[in-house]
Every structure is written in structure tokens, then in C-alpha cells.
Amino acid sequence: MATITIRNLDERVKRELQVRAALNGRSMEAEAREALSSLIAKSPSASKEGLGTRIHKRFAPFGGVDLEIPPRQFSRQLANEELKQGLGTAIHNLFAPLGGVELQIPPRRNSQRQIPTFE
């Protein structure tokens, strides 16, 4: 079970919750739990359908869209071969079909500090 904390609750709301809890013979926590549960149960999003189905129903009247889904290309053998070339190359090859990203990486500056030697 999850736990939540509600901060900055209006004093009037707290008193009303205490009164409702007393009238129903419950603790304030149990009353708040019941109030939240009943509120969620009454909401339109509380249907038994999944999120994808609800999104589809909402946008179906507008026509829809056909997406081309590329075949999967990743395999353990391919990953091992690319990792032998280096992690950077493997990441590049993985994301290259998506268009890639150009990053401006400044050149390393040469530090003037001496590297300590421990003799």
C-alpha cells in the first residue's frame, strides 16, 4: 500500500474531515482514505479500460494515423560486437537510425597543475 502526506491542508477541511470521521465511526485517516477512494471511483477515468483504449476512443473520431514501426535490430551478439569497438560507438550505432544528436563538446583544456608523484 502507498502512503501520501498532504501539506498545507486548510483548517476548515481538516475540521470537516474530523466531523465526518466521527459521524461514520472511523479515524480521520480512514475517512480520508474512503473519501479519496469514492472520488476516484466516480471519476470517468476509473473505467476498466486501459489507458491505450481510452486514448484510442478519444481520438478515433479524428481519423487516426498509421505509423511505420521499424523492425527490431538489437541482439546480444550485435551488442557484443559493437562493445568491442567501444561504448561510444555502440551508443552511436544504436541511436543513429533515430537521427542522432549533435553535441557541442568543448576541447579539453590542458591542466597546468603538476601530477603528484608518490615515491
Image (cartoon, rainbow, N blue to C red):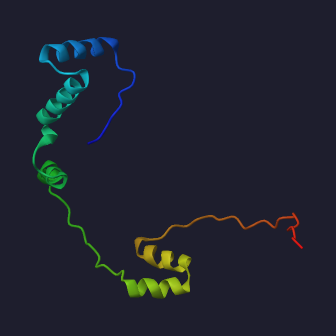
Say whether residue 67 is left or right of residue 8: left
Q: Which residue occupies the foreground of this view, 92 or 28? A: 28
In the rendered image, residue 15, in percent from the top left (x then y), is placed at 27, 12
On the image, the x and y values in percent for residue 12 come to: 30, 11
Task: Judge left or right: residue 119 versus residue 106.
Answer: right
Name the spot of residue 101 as percent of width and height, x first.
Answer: 51, 67
Q: What is the quadrant of residue 107 in the picture?
A: bottom right
Residue at (19% x, 51% y) in the render: 51
Q: Where 16 falls versus 2 (above or below)? A: above
Above-or-below relation of 60 to 27: below
Decide if residue 62 is in sight here: no
On the image, which quarter does residue 109 sit in?
bottom right
Above or below, 100 against 15 in this view is below
| Point 24% across, 14% down: residue | 18
Residue nearest the viewer, comparing 60 with 32 = 32
Report how many numbered discs are placed on residues in the image: 0
Foreground residue, 68 or 44? 44
The structure residue drawn at horizontal position 49% and vertical position 75%, both measured from the top left corner, is 91
Q: Residue at x 22, y 21 (%)?
A: 27
Task: Judge whether residue 108 can be spotted in this image.
Answer: yes
Residue 108 appears at what percent x and percent y? 74, 67
Q: Quadrant of the C terminus?
A: bottom right
Image-quadrant location for residue 39: top left
Position of the N terminus by quadrant: top left
